Image: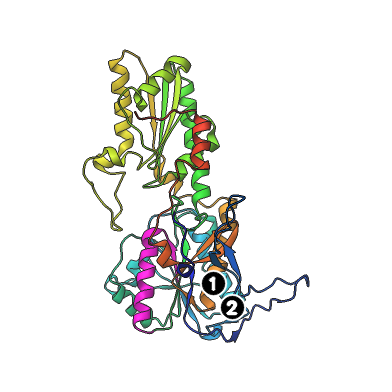
Amino acid sequence: MRRPEPHELTIRTLGAATIPSPLALSNVADDGIADYVNDGARVLYDVEFTAGDPAPSPVAFEKAGPRERIFFEPARTTAAIVACGGLCPGINNVVRSMVLQLHHKYGAPRVLGIRYGFSGLDRSCDLEPVVLGPAEVRHIHREGGSMLGSSRGAPTVEAMVDELERHDVQILFTIGGDGTCRGAHALAGEIERRKLMISIVAVPKTIDNDIAYVEQTFGYDTAVEIARQAVDAAHTEALSALDGVGIVKLMGRDAGFIAAAASLASRDVNFCLIPEARFELDGPKGLLAALQERLASRRHALIVAAEGCAASLVEGEGQRDASGNVRYAAGKNDFGPHLRDAIIAHFERVGVKAVVKYIDPSYMIRGCPANAHDSIFCDALARHAVHAGMAGKTDLIIGRAHGIFTHVPLSLVTGAHKRISTDGPTWLAVTESTGQPRLHG
């Protein structure tokens, strides 16, 4: 990702925050009471530079957290929550923590749950929102999926803003990935054009962990944990057969974070294929040649492949979903079976009786409940989102940089992508763990 310009990190607000916060926190250090966050607090983008070089000019994110003065009067505030895109561990945790924070800490009298993603803001779909209180969300964090439902795609921003006005919503919390961020940013633009006092605050949800300028998205940690179980099972299968080959295809459209992390967690992977790292199937330095050499020396091998790892090898665009993303689980874009068949055919040609086992746990890693780490993380993201919304901040996503929660403008997030750098520490760790060579000439 490129280094942002200072002005690109400015957070838009609906107006002056003049209402005292009901949180009863403190501005005095070491008094045993949690402190408000000063609105001028910032988190530096750069924490590393080379000795002897001039220090980079400061570029900093606005720090997230509760403000002493807020914009919306709690007793008159209606908030709404919408979850969009594919399922992800932790959606219900975020919804629950938002509802409890709004109800118990700010005293907001009305929280609405928008059903089935942005479709719930399309009046023609006839999906009235549900009212959410402590009783409605009491146990939802124990379950995977989304109690509100989810969907891809969206009606027009004009229609969605009309619905927000109809329900007298002051704050809309959107839970989703890159497509949801684009939709939320478009909503904020239409709201600004109409001069409405509606705050749009996003929470980063995607197991792919690919939202720009956000250190980590919720659901990713749980997805890696479940993916590792599939990788370990494939290793057992490969190790138990003469010339056994285990293949695991994991989610990761354009970024290989899940595949890379699952490989590092397993420590048994021999080849990790991600969208960011070029590789070839055929040729003297391609994957098939390297795999043949591996079997000749060790008699088993384990391959982990991100679903979008072979986008450059696929002719044409293929099918796309309602959000405009390439469907790598459909037709000719589904590289997993193609890789399996190519390996089987190769070893038949060279006279090796390879035993190939293919595992695709794709949707298993999305639909499970959040693990302990993600549960804690979801709660923190939700509370910081509520603080931002009540303070009248808008057109932003809750991020994290260097372990500190931040406010990141949606305009910045929607104009960039987070990827694994093939000359960075993550890919170095993967290649050192797997021992794989460069898989191209």
Question: From which residue to which does the magenta span run?
Answer: 173-195
Residue at the (36%, 75%) spot, across then down: 189
Q: Position of residue 212 (x, y in %)?
A: 44, 57
Q: Which residue is mark 1?
A: 386
Q: Position of residue 317 (x, y in %)?
A: 23, 47
Residue at the (40%, 64%) spot, across then down: 181
Q: Is residue 34 magenta?
A: no
Q: Residue furthest right?
A: 31
Residue at the (65%, 74%) spot, across then down: 36
Q: Is residue 254 above or below residue 343?
A: below
Residue 100, by quadrant, is: bottom right
Q: Is residue 9 above or below residue 403?
A: below
State the SS at label 2: helix
Q: Main secondary structure of the magenta part?
A: helix
Local crowd size for mark 1, using a 10 Å CA cut-off: few (<14), some (14–19), many (≥20)? many
Amino acid found under the numbered disc labelled 1: Val
Residue 106's disc is 2
Q: Is residue 175 magenta?
A: yes
Residue 86, by quadrant, is: bottom left
Viewer-nearest of discs 1 and 2: 1
The answer, for residue 284, to whether it is visible in the render is yes
**Quarter of the image containing the C terminus?**
top left
Local crowd size for mark 2, using a 10 Å CA cut-off: few (<14), some (14–19), many (≥20)? some
Earlier-in-chain disc, 1 versus 2: 2
Kindly report the distance in space between the C-alpha atoms of the residues bearing marks 1 and 2.
9 Å
Q: Nearer the viewer, residue 415 or 291?
A: 415
State the SS at label 1: helix
Amino acid found under the numbered disc labelled 2: Tyr
Q: Position of residue 268 (x, y in %)?
A: 52, 29
- Verify CB contact (< 8 Å) between mark 1 and mark 2: yes
